Image (tube, rainbow, N blue to C red):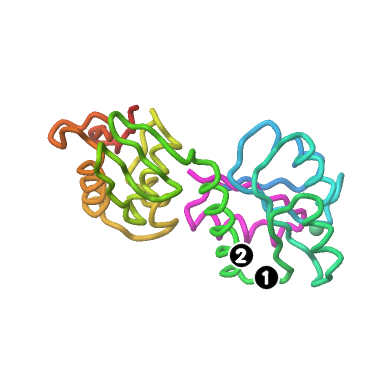
Amino acid sequence: MTRILIVEDEPGIALALEDDLTLEGYGVEVIQDGLAAVKRAREERFDAILLDVMLPGKDGFEVCRELRRSGVRTPILMLTARAQEAEKVLGLEAGADDYVTKPFGVRELRARIAALLRRSQAGSAPAVVRIGDAEVDFARGEIRRGPETTPLTPLEFRLLQAFVRARGRILTREQLITEAWGPNTFVTDRVVDNHIGSLRKKLEPDVAEPRYLRNVRGLGYRFDV
Ligand code: CA
């Protein structure tokens, strides 16, 4: 599950964000204080942080700077109060990845978060992964096997990235849908299975006996490599 840390001291905004993002399928945690936010973001891995500027304890810029200084590279979206150039610049200088200006619409925020996650996930998966006698080249979006090169479809690409990130762990079909199609998308299990079938054709030496993309009965799939 994609986990988002919301750092926001205004209860109304925090609650609205929490509700909306939970509905979108994200795992959400809310913290209201800058000091606690630094501690939490350092002790646990989140996929993204939404960070308000005016906070008790430590302001958002300080939180951001401190996290970056201590090596936390989680994407940070600043929630700035005013459309002031200075605040945007300060945020970006402090190491934030993007910002939205209050009051913001939920749709804009969702889009910003999705873009942030896409960018960071594209950056975190290794560019080339060897799977048996195949070589997956994420930078070029293709699978090489012997003299043969097969392009990956965008869905296969995202599925495979999710599998590589979660290697050795079971991914439910629901998690795969969130990763490859996006949170809150309605996709039947059968469609997921079809795409995994086509991935297997490109990857597995023997499609009848999959060695890498394993079906875990009643639970989902696991990528063993
Ligand atoms: Ca505030």
Rendered position, 32 above or below 112: above
Front residue (pair 171, 119): 119
Q: Which amino acid does label 2 sit on?
A: Leu
Q: Do the numbered discs 1 and 2 sit on residues whose CB atoms are within 8 Å? A: yes
Q: Quadrant of residue 89?
A: bottom right
Rendered position, 125 above or below 43: below
Front residue (pair 73, 193): 73
Magenta stretch, residue numbers: 1-27
Rendered residue at 81%/50% (across/down): 94
Neighbor class of circle 2 (other Cα within 10 Å; few <14, some 14-19, many 20+) is some
Rendered residue at 81%/40% (across/down): 66
Q: What residue type is labelled 1?
A: Phe
Q: Is mark 2 on a helix, strand or loop?
A: helix
Rendered residue at 56%/53% (across/down): 119
The image shows residue 188 at horizontal and vertical percentages of 26, 55
Q: Is 20 within the magenta?
A: yes
Q: Let me know if residue 33 appears in the view.
A: no
Could you tell whether 66 is left or right of 212 in the image?
right
Front residue (pair 159, 59): 159
Q: Quadrant of residue 78?
A: bottom right
Rendered position, 213 above or below 8: above
The image shows residue 223 at horizontal and vertical percentages of 33, 33
Neighbor class of circle 1 (other Cα within 10 Å; few <14, some 14-19, many 20+) is few
Q: Quadrant of the C terminus?
A: top left
Front residue (pair 149, 2): 149
Q: In which quarter of the image is ligand 1?
A: bottom right
The image shows residue 61 at horizontal and vertical percentages of 83, 51
Q: Is 111 within the magenta?
A: no
Residue wearing tag 2: 109
Residue wearing tag 1: 104
Q: Distance between the residues labelled 1 and 2?
A: 7 Å
Answer with mark 1 or mark 2, whichever residue precedes in sequence.
Answer: 1
